[in-house]
Image (cartoon, rainbow, N blue to C red):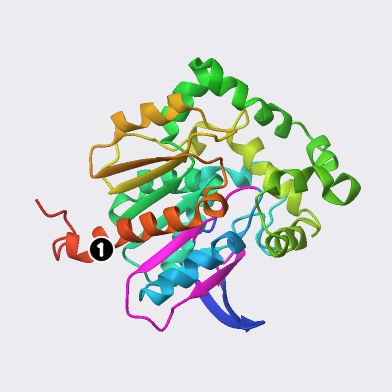
Amino acid sequence: MGTNNSYSVKEIIINDEWFAEINNGEYVLNCRIGGMENDGETVILLHGFPETSYMWVELMDMLTKKGYRVIAPDQRGYSPKARPTLIKEYTLKHTVSDVLAVANAYKLKRFHLVGHDWGSSVGWAFIAEYPNMIYSWTSLSIPHMKAFQEAYNNDFDQQKKSKYIGFFNMPFFPELYMSFNNYKNLRKVWKVHGDEEIDAYLNVFRQRGALRSALNWYRANIGNRRKPSDYIQFGNVSVPTLFIWGNMDMAIGRKSVELSEKYMKGPYTFIELYAGHWLIQEEFDKVSNEIIKHIGKYSSSFYEPHLGRKK
């Protein structure tokens, strides 16, 4: 789980892009990095399924030009040297520990956090566990986890949208289905993605164990496999939060979105777009501008020197 405090960072350049290999003593996470020469605050970007850190390249460019330092890890299962075989090693407890490893490796006391899809789930979990490490939090597509659970349990629309989760929890068959005929069925998910982006994702999913590891996020976190110690205590949120949702999202219905607000006890901004699940690809200009505005508003100047919030 990477609980040891020995972290190392190796920065390398590949095809004119900077990457970091972050070793937590157990696994090595590959991260895209940018603006490390800048003196601004750090932004960590968390991708979801079935994408990688490549989804963030345009936003990273914008952020670095604004003076921020940016880190976008290929999360557990997506990085070749962070691909455990056991399902139980993909719980949110473990993936949160990976984000903590990234922060500790770069000696970050506080940073901005942005997530999409499963990256948002990790983000909600991280701010629940380590709220004092966060300047601002942005979730794309995914509502507060307790709000989603309420809708998942009680809302027919959300239950219909979530039927795919049961399929992903099956052993072996989802991998076979998605990889069949040169990943034909996985390609259907990427209808709004560009060819270069799709190629980048396929380069990962063609690796041994990568698709299974990515699907293990569903198997580990949704179902009856978790132990009590695996659960994150989601509750009220005081961290400044931006939540952007597309009202044509095939996976997230309106009910959980509306329920999220009751958990927001700090600054909260909600933006609804006429878009689907892939907000970065569908509405890049709107989404990126809102993220940058949110990050800028809740920078270190929003906080007292002792890191308590200004009154």
Whole-percent x and y of residue 147? 41, 28
- Which residue is at 30% across, 43% downward? 269
In the image, residue 105 sits, relative to residue 242, either above or below, namely below
User: For the view shown, which residue lies furthest in the right direction?
Assistant: 181
Q: Magenta part of the protein: which range?
A: 22-49
Residue 289 is a magenta residue: no
Residue shown at 57%/47% (left/top)?
Answer: 278
Residue 5, picture quadrant? bottom left
Q: Is 109 on the left or on the right of 92, as rendered?
A: left
The number of numbered discs placed on residues in the rendered structure image is: 1
Using the rendered view, name the quadrant where residue 10 is placed.
Answer: bottom right
- Residue 130 vs 60, above or below: the answer is above
Q: Nearer the viewer, residue 222 or 36?
A: 36
Along the horizontal axis of the image, is 162 left or right of 42?
Answer: right
Position of 73 with respect to 187 (left or right) is left
The residue depicted at 13 percent of the width and 61 percent of the height is 304
Q: Amino acid at mark 1?
A: Ser
Quadrant of the image containing the N terminus: bottom right
Question: Is label 1 in a helix, a strand or a loop?
Answer: loop
Disc 1 crowd rating (10 Å Cα; few below 14, some 14-19, many 20+) is some
Q: Position of residue 277 (x, y in %)?
A: 56, 41
